[in-house]
Amino acid sequence: MAFLRSPFGKNRGRKQWEDCALVVIDMQNDFCLPDRALCVKGAMGCLPKVEEAVKFAREIKVPLFWVCREHDPSGCDIELTRAHLFQNGGAGTCVTGTEGAALVEPLTREEGDHYIAKKRWSGFFNTHLDSVLKRLGVTRLVLAGVQTPNCIRGTAYDAIALDYPEVVVLSDATASKSIEVQENNLQDMRDAGVKVITVDEWRKCV
């Protein structure tokens, strides 16, 4: 696997990682907790590996991005296919400032982390993620979070369309509603040129 040999080779120092960023997507209560309308069944299962990836990113001091859904309480900014969640007295989902929009515990934002609010699946759609990444000199993205067929895949494909040279998905720090859906989508992304590795494999690149 080319990613494991180059460019993330061993013992190459801090500069080795200067063009890499970890992007954690939608690890929020409304997508992770089992009693929520949009719960991703595999979300809590991948949470320990997401924690591990976040810890590793902080250890090697690469930019860490939290890309999260946020919606107006009226639901006026959600896609039409989910508008029903706000209708007829519905509480909606990931409403700005609510517990549902918060990161699922024990994940926390720390000083120096970057935060991007989004309204759709891709972290790039109508956000400033691309401009911030480019300002930081990031050319290689490592993606974690939920859910793989929607927000992970959408972000990965947009990153390819935006000509990021290397896009990586952490297979065990992402999740779907079933193992079958997870594996099928990971394979589709491999076929599109996305590198799919585990958190342990990422750590061993140093």
Image (cartoon, rainbow, N blue to C red):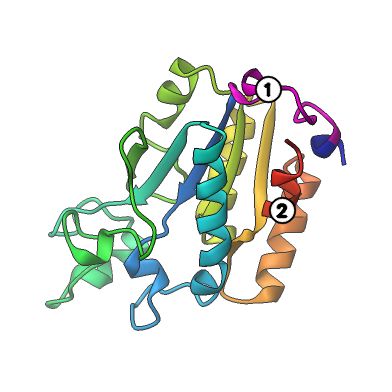
Q: Residue at x 53, y 43 (%)?
A: 155
Q: 10 Å neighbourhood of mark 1: few (<14), some, or many (≥20)?
A: few
SS class, disc 1:
loop
Q: Is residue 18 left or right of residue 90?
A: right
Question: What mark, if any, has residue 200 been given in the picture?
Answer: 2
Q: Residue at x 46, y 38 (%)?
A: 64
Q: Position of residue 203 (x, y in %)?
A: 69, 45
Q: Quadrant of the C terminus?
A: top right
Q: Position of residue 189 (x, y in %)?
A: 72, 49
Question: For the view shown, which residue lies furthest in the bottom direction?
Answer: 35
Q: In the depicted view, which residue is nearer to us: 114 or 12?
A: 12
Task: Please give the residue where the numbered disc 1 appears in the rendered image.
Answer: 13
Q: Nearer the viewer, mark 1 or mark 2?
A: 1
Q: 10 Å neighbourhood of mark 2: few (<14), some, or many (≥20)?
A: few
Residues in magenta?
5-18
Q: In the depicted view, which residue is nearer to us: 83 or 105?
A: 105
